Amino acid sequence: MFGMDDPSKVIEQIRSYIAEGRLELAEVMAQELSTHLLNSKRDNELDRILVLVLREWTLVLFIREQWAEARHASIKLAKARKIEIRRLRSLGDVESLSQGLQLEVEDIVLQGRIESSRGNFRASRKWFSRAIKRDQHHIEARLSRIGSRWRIKGTLKGGKNDVLDLLYTLEKSAGVERIGGVLGMRISGSALAPIDRILEIIEGCSDPSLGLPISVVERAKKMKECIHSEINQIESGERESDARLAAAIDSLTPTLDYHQYSSN
């Protein structure tokens, strides 16, 4: 295979092909490199590269809607990732370990999406819940957990706790932000969840015909109204795009003491 003597360059090429939409070629390259590494004697560096290429292989299979193959690739990825995480722990490399654990969360979310696409709600919910357990601030995992129930079952009945968990998490966020030109919401340094994706799920949670208790529906409606209001404020320039910056500015602005002002 071309470039097998430098597998890191092959991974760069695979990513480039995915970005360009050349998915079939990306899949072939990812499969060949993954198979080669899995059947070869590896050192620490090749173990690291194996995780990277298995991640790309799983992703491209998912994008191409090859659910069964994506699931098998994700299982191989999980095994390779476990070895890599164990190595990072032993090295005491805090930064690399932190990055590895965050990527692990994203891998788990993808596993949930694969199971959801296969129509397996119970398995998908298990993976999304596992991602949330690993990252308490992960908004997308919560959206996907609700979206999977909605798509597979055609209802949100039985999803009260999941919806309340999402709403509580969104309420803890700094509000709508525009980061890198994208409107979304996040908590602390967690990944930004696109606002269109959030509103798509909140719209379902606001629909009383989908089986949620009316109290939950009303709370979702309030969240939807709040999100739209914050979007309008950002678009009109009335609110800082970076919600955390806005909060910092507000904290520096002295509160007007009306009684002291009127006595002068």
Image (tube, rainbow, N blue to C red):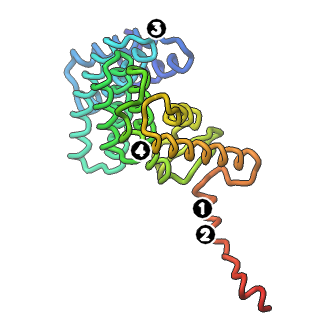
Q: Residue 232: give x, y in percent of width and height.
A: 71, 45
Q: From the image, which quarter does the C terminus lie in?
A: bottom right
Query: Which residue shows up at 76% across the image and 47% down it?
Result: 236
Mark 1 lies on residue: 247
Q: Quadrant of residue 11?
A: top left
Name the residue beneath numbered marker 2.
251
Mark 3–mark 2 distance (CA, rounded to whole Å): 52 Å
- The one nearer the camera, 151 or 155, is 155
Q: Residues within 10 Å of mark 1 (few under 14, many from 20)?
A: few
Q: How far apart are labels 4 and 3 at the CA level? A: 40 Å
Label 3 Cα crowd, 10 Å radius (few <14 / some 14-19 / many 20+): some
Residue 54 vs 184, above or below: the answer is above
| 55 on left or right of 63 | left
The residue pinned by badge 3 equals 24
Amino acid type, mark 1: Ala
First in residue order: circle 1 vs circle 4: 4
The mark lying in front, picked from 4 and 3, is: 4
Q: Please tell me which residue lies in front, 87 or 203.
A: 203
Which residue is at the front of the view, 74 or 187? 187
Under mark 2, the amino acid is Ser
Mark toward the viewer: 1 or 3: 1
Numbered disc 3: secondary structure = helix
Q: CA distance from mark 1 to mark 2?
A: 6 Å
Residue 162 image-quadrant placement? top left
Pointers 1 and 2 in contact (CB under 8 A)?
Answer: yes
Is residue 239 found left or right of 150 in the rendered image?
Answer: right
Name the amino acid type tagged 4.
Leu
Q: Position of residue 195 (x, y in %)?
A: 58, 38
- Residue type at mark 3 is Glu
Image position of 20 (left or right of 52)? right
Q: Secondary structure at mark 4?
A: helix
Q: Which residue is identified by label 4?
A: 164
